[in-house]
Image (tube, rainbow, N blue to C red):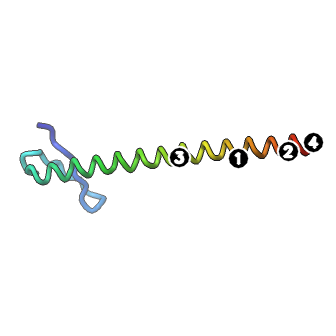
Amino acid sequence: MESRILRMNNKEQLTVSPEEIGSVGQRRLEEKEENKLRRSNEVSHTHGELTSKTGEAAEMLNNAQETEE
């Protein structure tokens, strides 16, 4: 079994094996990792949407400027 590094007070780290954590603690760690990944994916998705909208706005502005000329 692999050991996990747990953060304590955002400064110290403690290495704990799954046997020491127990099944409930292990599941909480897994949920925490899943939530972190989900949030990361949500941020990536939102960033992609914003990038797309920015590109659309730039294209519209460019078209408007060409129309004025």
Secondary structure at numbered mark 3? helix
How far apart in space, not on screen, are marks 4 and 2 (Cα)? 6 Å
Residue underneath mark 3: 47
Q: Is residue 51 left or right of residue 21?
A: right
Q: Residues within 10 Å of mark 4 (few under 14, many from 20)?
A: few
Eye-nearest disc, 1 or 3: 1
What amino acid type should be assigned to the residue bearing mark 1? Ala
Residue at 55 percent across and 45 percent down: it is 49
Residue 2 rendering spot, x and y as whole percentages = 15, 38
Residue at 38 percent across and 50 percent down: it is 39
Residue at 8 percent across and 51 percent down: it is 22
How far apart in space, not on screen, are marks 4 and 3 (Cα)? 33 Å
Q: Which labelled disc corresponds to residue 69? A: 4
What amino acid type should be assigned to the residue bearing mark 3? His
Secondary structure at numbered mark 1? helix
What amino acid type should be assigned to the residue bearing mark 4? Glu
Secondary structure at numbered mark 4? loop
Residue 18 rendering spot, x and y as whole percentages = 11, 45
Eye-nearest disc, 4 or 3: 4
Residue at 75 percent across and 44 percent down: it is 60
Residue 13 rendering spot, x and y as whole percentages = 23, 53
Residue underneath mark 2: 65
Q: Residues within 10 Å of mark 2 (few under 14, many from 20)?
A: few
Residue underneath mark 1: 57
Furthest-top residue in this view: 1
Furthest-bottom residue in this view: 9
How far apart in space, not on screen, are marks 4 and 1 (Cα)? 19 Å
